[in-house]
Amino acid sequence: MEEDIDTRKINNSFLRDHSYATEADIISTVEFNHTGELLATGDKGGRVVIFQREQEVLVEEQTPDVVLGSILRVLKFSLPSLQSKNQVHRRGEYNVYSTFQSHEPEFDYLKSLEIEEKINKIRWLPQQNAAYFLLSTNDKTVKLWKVSERDKRPEGYNLKDEEGRLRDPATITTLRVPVLRPMDLMVEATPRRVFANAHTYHINSISVNSDYETYMSADDLRINLWNFEITNQSFNIVDIKPANMEELTEVITAAEFHPHHCNTFVYSSSKGTIRLCDMRASALCDRHTKFFEEPEDPSNRSFFSEIISSISDVKFSHSGRYIMTRDYLTVKVWDLNMENRPIETYQVHDYLRSKLCSLYENDCIFDKFECVWNGSDSVIMTGSYNNFFRMFDRNTKRDVTLEASRENSKPRAILKPRKVCVGGKRRKDEISVDSLDFSKKILHTAWHPSENIIAVAATNNLYIFQDKVN
């Protein structure tokens, strides 16, 4: 890691070497902010690392090769946009901006239960001033963090000496006007709010409302609505807990607010259903406004049907017209005006259908993959095994499989599409389904809100790729 990033006072221990990675280093969430200038990652160790995109600089370049991808954690990289034959206008690099410990491990003595420090989700708030705000959550507690810069410090206190100790007022004979002196840029992360003690079960989702005054947090059986200014009280807006827990048939797996209508939200369930709720209808949204479910094909019915139909992620499109859901084998796009079936279904790794028994035995069948839209809602992306991730173009119906690995992601290199061979003769550039590494999985991805830049978390490595620039 190059030394120039030390111009900002950061804790370099957060930049961990691949060979010494531990369980705590595994990235558990990735999220761009609303402008795409910042990228936050959370890990199982309860830490948040924020990367900032540097400003554009014009540099001399003899052979302006365009870049598709590079590894952020290993070395710095450039995302160039061609200007002339030997001048490249470099789109700024993403460098470490701030690192801080968001959550610590806790122990619930009443229930004899350990509470992990793992960051389950990060959500940015739109920037209103010079500071940045983000929400981070583990299984039980949501925190609101303020990330701000300081490049000046006050000097010339009357009641304190230069080392900060209080002076004896009797020795003060003159009054001084404190002044601000320049100092090295320092990025500070401070917790502004702590929203705790509202969830009995593990939090799986948080979503900021479009009014930017409220947000919701969802666990397995309940969804709570919070006001950013009130930490000791939340409103329970969904409660699916049965009177007798033995009658429990489904749990909430993900929830999200509509991007434009502050009264509307959706949540998905382990039964593969999606419910759209309107908070104007009643205080407790036990009765949904719309119910999205696709009838199961009897020919595909198997022992694993219920497990693989569980929805692991749900996302509104930026336009607010569509909902995207991810289950174990597919990504589906739903129109808000059509509840009986999805308008688009994309097979992510259908070649694993014959491997479900072994995937059940090694618990991989319970992996929770996320999915994301690009800025124009025309392309969707989701992860798979063997460090593969998939992209589907909704307009052309073309799809591609790419691999995020150190060997294939050298600086200024173009990623080659990968193909999985199910049976028969295997071609030179194909990989057999029996050779897939199920310990290497891409569960968390993020897409820049306006550009073709993606962030992909592969265990403890963060990869950032850019579309080829013409």
Image (cartoon, rainbow, N blue to C red):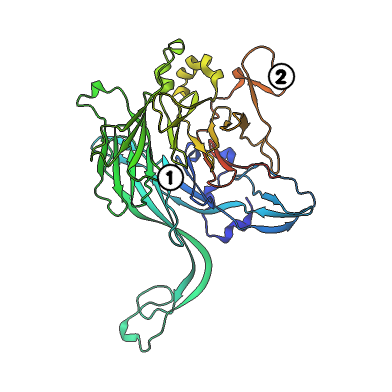
Task: Residue 440 in the image: state x and y as whole percent.
Answer: 55, 29
Residue 418 in view here: yes
Residue at far bottom of view? 173
The answer to whether residue 423 is left or right of residue 277 is right
Crowd class of label 2 (few under 14; some 14 to 19; many from 20; radius 10 Å)? few
Mark number, residue 427:
2
Kind of residue sitting beneath label 2: Arg
Q: Residue at x 46, y 47 (%)?
A: 48
Q: Residue at x 56, y 42 (%)?
A: 455
Task: Residue 314 in the image: state x and y as whole percent.
Answer: 42, 34
Q: Earlier in the sequence, mark 1 or mark 2?
A: 1
Q: Number of numbered discs present?
A: 2
Q: Secondary structure at mark 1?
A: strand
Q: Residue at x 29, y 44 (%)?
A: 225
Kind of residue sitting beneath label 1: Ile
Residue at far front of view? 337
Would you place residue 31 above or below residue 433 in this image?
Answer: below
Mark number, residue 122:
1
Labelled pair 1, 2 in contact (Cβ < 8 Å):
no
Crowd class of label 1 (few under 14; some 14 to 19; many from 20; radius 10 Å)? many
Residue 119 in view here: no
Residue 31 vs residue 160, the one in the foreground: 31
Mark number, residue 209:
none
